[in-house]
């Protein structure tokens, strides 16, 4: 069994585009994007490692208003790439009326691009 790798990430919510962009804090060279579904896009670097995720139509996908998404306090992603699938499990904490709410999102697709096996946990510092 492979050991999870843990990386720090930074994120930004763009209210006009209603998109959350999450990326590793380290420098990387972009290679390719893989669409996990219509609203989730994962970016891979030149070494075929996952480095960023974009959640489009975030307020709809996460079932929360745009204003609340401006109050993200924490997030954690678990990314798993194996020979068959690429999947991501996202947990986002937002403050709504001074109360922490956890939003969850899971998405996956077939690994038809033969990305190498890679388990990782990405979280804010």
Image (cartoon, rainbow, N blue to C red):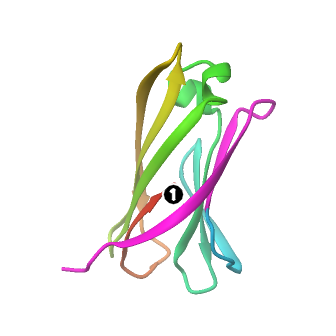
Among all residues in the image, which is located at the extreme left? Answer: 1
Q: Is residue 57 visible?
A: yes
In the rendered image, residue 12 lying in the magenta stretch gets the answer yes
Query: Residue 13, image x and y in percent?
Result: 69, 39
Among all residues in the image, which is located at the extreme right? Answer: 16
The residue where tag 1 is placed is 125
Query: Residue 18, image x and y in percent?
Result: 71, 32
Q: Is residue 111 above or below residue 57?
A: below
Main SS, magenta region, reads strand
Q: In the displayed structure, does residue 8 sit left or right of residue 101? A: right
For label 1, the SS is loop
Work out whether residue 17 or residue 84 is closer to the camera in this orientation and state it: 17
Report the residue at 59% width, 72% height from top: 44
Q: In the displayed structure, does residue 34 sit left or right of residue 81? A: right
Report the residue at 51% width, 17% height from top: 98
Marker count (numbered): 1
Q: In the displayed structure, does residue 1 sit left or right of residue 121? A: left
Q: Is residue 42 visible?
A: no
Q: Quadrant of the N terminus?
A: bottom left
Work out whether residue 74 or residue 53 is closer to the camera in this orientation and state it: 74
Q: Is residue 96 above or below residue 71?
A: above
Query: Residue 111, image x and y in percent?
Result: 42, 69
Query: Callout 1: few (<14), some (14-19), or many (20+) C-alpha neighbours within 10 Å?
Result: few
Q: In the displayed structure, does residue 94 sit left or right of residue 107? A: right
Quadrant location of residue 3? bottom left
Work out whether residue 60 or residue 4 is closer to the camera in this orientation and state it: 4
Report the residue at 25% width, 80% height from top: 2
Report the residue at 51% width, 30% height from top: 94
Work out whether residue 28 or residue 44 is closer to the camera in this orientation and state it: 28
Magenta stretch: give its range. Answer: 1-23
Among all residues in the image, which is located at the extreme bottom? Answer: 47
In the rendered image, residue 69 lying in the magenta stretch gets the answer no
């Amino acid at each position: 069994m492979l050991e999870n790798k843990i990386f720090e990430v930074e994120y930004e919510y763009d209210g006009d585009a209603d998109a959350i962009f999450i990326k590793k804090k380290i420098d990387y060279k972009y290679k390719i994007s893989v669409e996990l579904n219509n609203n989730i896009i994962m970016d891979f670097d030149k070494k075929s490692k996952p480095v960023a995720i974009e959640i489009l139509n975030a307020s709809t996908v996460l079932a929360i208003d745009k204003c609340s998404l401006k109050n993200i306090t924490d997030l954690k992603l678990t990314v798993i790439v194996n020979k068959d699938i690429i999947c991501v499990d996202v947990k986002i904490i937002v403050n709504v009326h001074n109360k922490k709410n956890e939003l969850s999102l899971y998405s996956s697709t077939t690994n038809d691009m033969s990305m190498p096996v890679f388990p990782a946990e990405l979280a804010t510092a």
